[in-house]
Image (cartoon, grey):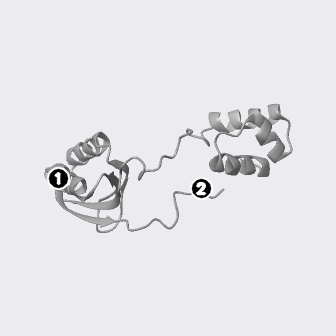
Amino acid sequence: MLDETDTRLLQALQRDAHLTAQQLGELLNLSPSQAGRRRQRLESAGYIRSYVARLDPVRLGLQVQGFVQVHLSTHGPEHSKSFARLVNTRPEITSAWTMTGDADYLLRVYCADLPALNVLIHEILLPHPAVARVQSQIVMDQLKSDGPLPT
């Protein structure tokens, strides 16, 4: 179980993963060694899965962010595994979820431009034997970036 100090530590690390044990200790009113041990315990217990850098897609030349709904024509396990393998090979697809409802999958994609998105949809996704159709939505503006998880 997480106590209030663990929760505050997780919130602080979601805002800034570079915080040192000294800085965490100051925020949490703990010694640096206590803060460091708590962080290590939360890492070992799987609460903290990794530390990553959030890059600016526009500065990287990725001008188009979109969401692509994929509808399968057939739902056999081999087709699903094959589609999952395809998704995992494509760097443009940054997140993928299986869904309830009309679409089987929801893909978050970043592409350099609209022609690159067109290639992804028409030359990569649609030719897959299990895919019946795709539906895409292009992000016009992101009102809130991927935020920290509520704790």
Residue at disc 2, secondary structure: loop
- Tell me if residue 93 comes above or below residue 141 in the rendering: above
**CA gap, disc 1 to disc 2?**
34 Å
Between residues 149 and 103, which one lies in front from this camera angle? 149
Mark seen at residue 60: none
Let me know if residue 115 appears in the view.
Answer: yes
Image location of residue 86, percent across then percent down: 25, 43
Name which residue lies at 43% across and 67% down. Answer: 141
**Disc on the earlier residue, 1 or 2:** 1
Amino acid identity at mark 2: Leu
Q: Which residue is mark 1?
A: 130
Residue at disc 1, secondary structure: loop
Residues packed near mark 1 inside 10 Å, few (<14), some (14 to 19) or many (20 plus)? many
Tell which tag, 1 or 2, sits nearer the viewer.
2
- Tell me if residue 46 comes above or below residue 112 in the rendering: above
Let me know if residue 75 appears in the view.
Answer: no
Q: Which residue is mark 2?
A: 149
* Total numbered circles: 2
Residues packed near mark 2 inside 10 Å, few (<14), some (14 to 19) or many (20 plus)? few
Quadrant where the image shows the C terminus: bottom right
Amino acid identity at mark 1: Ala
Name which residue lies at 78% across and 40% down. Answer: 23
Q: Using the rendered view, name the quadrant where residue 73 is placed.
A: bottom left
Proximity of marks 1 and 2: CB atoms separated by less than 8 Å: no
Relative to residue 46, is residue 117 drawn left or right? left
Q: Using the rendered view, name the quadrant where residue 41 is placed.
A: top right
- Tell me if residue 51 comes above or below residue 133 in the rendering: above
Q: Using the rendered view, name the quadrant where residue 68 is placed.
A: bottom left
Image location of residue 113, percent across then percent down: 28, 56
Name which residue lies at 64% across and 42% down. Answer: 17
